[in-house]
Amino acid sequence: MNRSLIIVMGALALCGAIFAGSYFTARHATMVCCTRSADDLSWLQTEFHLTDPEMARIRDLHQGYLPKCGAMCAKIAAKKGELDALLGNSTNITDEAQAKMNELAALRAQCQAQMLQHFLAVSQAMPPEEGKRYLDEMRQFTLGGPGQMEQSMSGDTDHEHHH
Amino acid sequence: MKENNQLPADPQFSALLREARVSPGLPPRFQQNVWRRIEDAEATTKPVSWLDVLASLVLRPRFAVAAATLMLLGGVVAGTLEGRQMAQHDAQMNYLASVAPESVR
């Protein structure tokens, strides 16, 4: 093989190794550094540029919300267990299973409403612009876009519907 | 020389004088010019490819150090930005996990 080609290829490989080594080391170091001593709410403060008093108010709201959320989660998990037990060996959906599904859906809706209520309260503890952005983002994450699922299933959009 | 001409003719000495040649001194920078002409001749017969130029560039210590430094700095900057973004994403996911359980999302 051409000597010059070997030299150029070797140089390129060395450059790639140096870049990759420094890239992964810096990425790991930054992640370790940024995630250390960060609690669940640290993201809110940096993302929405909140002051300490605003954070203190939000922290109170968060602490008040967590037990309610936990209790609701426990109810949902219990109802899901009951539904799983009913559906376990059956080959069709009985009236009882249907009723459990309705109860589960109602619990989930209740939980979502409670969650949205919390997001509203948190957004009101922020400056108006940041609060609006927070609320939009939380809606996006928790409920998805407006009618996203329905749109995708209805065939109104130009996506391909595979069966 | 006049004195020599006046000497009685010596056939052997005359023959030696005829054979003797004065070698002229080499012109200035003779050796360098020879090498330059050799190099020029080689250059016209075998053109240097871009790969050879690149290889000779790569082998220069100054260029090698500069390229290595550039790669190192580029990697550090890109890694730091990516790491910060990933840490932010992780923090966001942690917050969401704490307020919005998977079962209702």
Image (spheres, coloured by chain):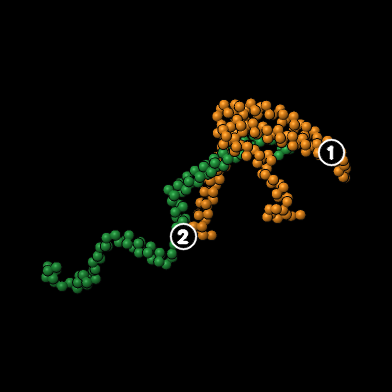
Chain colours: A orange, B green
In the rendered image of this protein, does residue B20 appear above or below residue A45?
below
Label 1 SS: helix
Quadrant of the image containing the N terminus of chain B: bottom left
Say which residue appears at 87% left-offset and 38% top-offset.
A96
- The amino acid type found where label 1 is placed reads Ala
Image mark count: 2
Q: Mark 1 — on which chain does it sit?
A: A
Which residue is tagged 2? B50
From the viewer's perspective, is the residue at label 2 or at label 1 nearer? 1
Which residue is tagged 1? A99
Q: Nearer the viewer, residue A80 or B14?
A: A80
Badge 2: few (under 14), some or many (20 or more) residues near its Cα, within 10 Å?
A: few
Question: Residue B64 placed where, x, y %?
Answer: 46, 49
Say which residue appears at 66% left-offset and 36% top-offset.
B96
Question: Residue A115 placed where, x, y %?
Answer: 69, 34
Residue B24 visible (yes or no) = yes
Residue B72 visible (yes or no) = no
Question: Residue B47 placed where, x, y %?
Answer: 43, 64
Question: Residue A16 placed where, x, y %?
Answer: 54, 49
Q: Mark 2 — on which chain does it sit?
A: B
Left or right, residue A158 beside residue B40: right
In the rendered image of this protein, does residue A8 appear above or below residue B102?
below
Badge 1: few (under 14), some or many (20 or more) residues near its Cα, within 10 Å?
A: few
Say which residue appears at 56% left-offset and 45% top-offset.
A20
Q: Nearer the viewer, residue A152 or A70?
A: A152
Q: Nearer the viewer, residue B33 or A24?
A: A24
